[in-house]
Amino acid sequence: MKTVHVITRMIVGGAQENTLLTVEGQHRDYGDDVTLVTGPTEGREGSLIDRARRGGFDVIEVPSLIRAISPVHEVRATRELCRLFRELDPEIVHTHSGKAGLLGRTAAARVGVPVVHTVHGPSFYRGQSPLAYRVYLAAEKWAAKRTDRFITVCDAMADQYAAAGVAPRDAFVTVYSGMDVEPFLEPPRPRDEVRAELGFAAGDVVVAKVARLFHEKGHDDLIAAAERVATEHAAAKFLLIGDGILREQFVADVARRGLAERFVFTGLVPPSQVAELIHAADVVAHASYREGLARVLPQGLIAGKPVVSYAIDGAPEVCIDGETGYLIDFRDVAGLAKAIGRLVGDAALRDRLGAEGRGRFTDRFRHQTMTRRIREVYANVLAGR
């Protein structure tokens, strides 16, 4: 099968890791002729582009495919994508992310190539300005008319897009975002060794969050909740994994609240190191304001850690309240603190919820399962054509 994947940039992030694993799996496991097309990869989040270039498939950078809104660049990028699609002549174009999804589907429709689009997270969401919401929703509806099939990383995304009138519900197929589960099943390095390097003591109960230090990722809420947890649980420590433009702000906030001794900021780490850091923790917390389905939730569960999350988007599909973790109402900082405190104070509860999550979700989130199901979607689209 000959496919072209299009994504805006290959930073270290959930959508990008999903896309790269899909491309690698198609190329390695099925012998597909796969090309990855991306815009420039830049930013403090780190880059996956070097790994992509070592994958044995073609990687093409389109300089005009930038993340920022720029009509001139968007016209250029669309023309370049049209040229590439004609030259490469794929059976399927698979688009990812907002900007690449819009321009890639536009170009594929002009060239007459079937197109599948993955919704990794909502482009329109609560909290946006009314104007931005209407503009992004209108863009998604326009692009939907040029989409043969949607893949969503959770049922919630499909439900939201269908309810907003983007496309009928049966146009969407849920394929959970796969990963290499083995490092989360077995620690790559001894847990005690990693904890010691981070400065944690044997009796510390560590709450980890994996996310870019960026707006709407919920670090502000977690820090505020940590202040409450700290008053009741002397053993509670917090591990923030990732980097971003708000690091200095969060470091200052932690210090202002007198929590500097309780927080460890890892900075940017390679994706391969995330598993050992999650194994070094005892609880995984994710207080993001919007996600498709945050990869760290199944990662934490597969590692045997209970999870705490706001009840947004796809989180309730893996964070089963009282069974694999605790779901909290959106922006309920007091509820977030209560759930974290309960887990910090009860080791048996942590073990029980973590074991349940591992048993339920390990096979469902294997990247081999994801790639197989995505190829089935391609086959159905081509059969329908």
Image (cartoon, grey):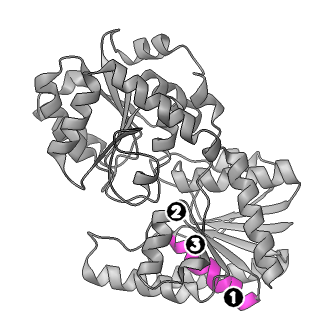
N-terminal of the pair, mark 3 or mark 2, is 3
Q: Earlier in the sequence, mark 1 or mark 2?
A: 1
Spatial CA distance of label 1 from label 2 is 21 Å
Relative to residue 127, is residue 364 drawn left or right? right
Residues shaded magenta: 98-111
- The tag on residue 205 is none
Q: Position of residue 95 (x, y in %)?
A: 64, 70
Query: Comparing marks 1 and 2, which lies closer to the viewer?
Result: 2
Residue at the disc numbered 1: 109
- Asked if the stretch drawn in magenta spans residue 19, the answer is no
The answer to whether residue 316 is left or right of residue 78 is: left
Label 3: how many Cα within 10 Å (few below 14, some 14–19, many 20+): many
Q: Quadrant of the N terminus?
A: bottom right
Identify the residue under disc 2.
120
Does the CB distance between marks 1 and 2 fall below 8 Å? Answer: no
| Above or below, comparing residue 4 to residue 70 in the picture | above
Residue 382 drawn above or below residue 13: below
Secondary structure under tag 2 reads: loop
Q: Secondary structure at mark 3?
A: helix
Report the amino acid beneath label 1: Ala
Residue 230: % across, % down: 15, 26
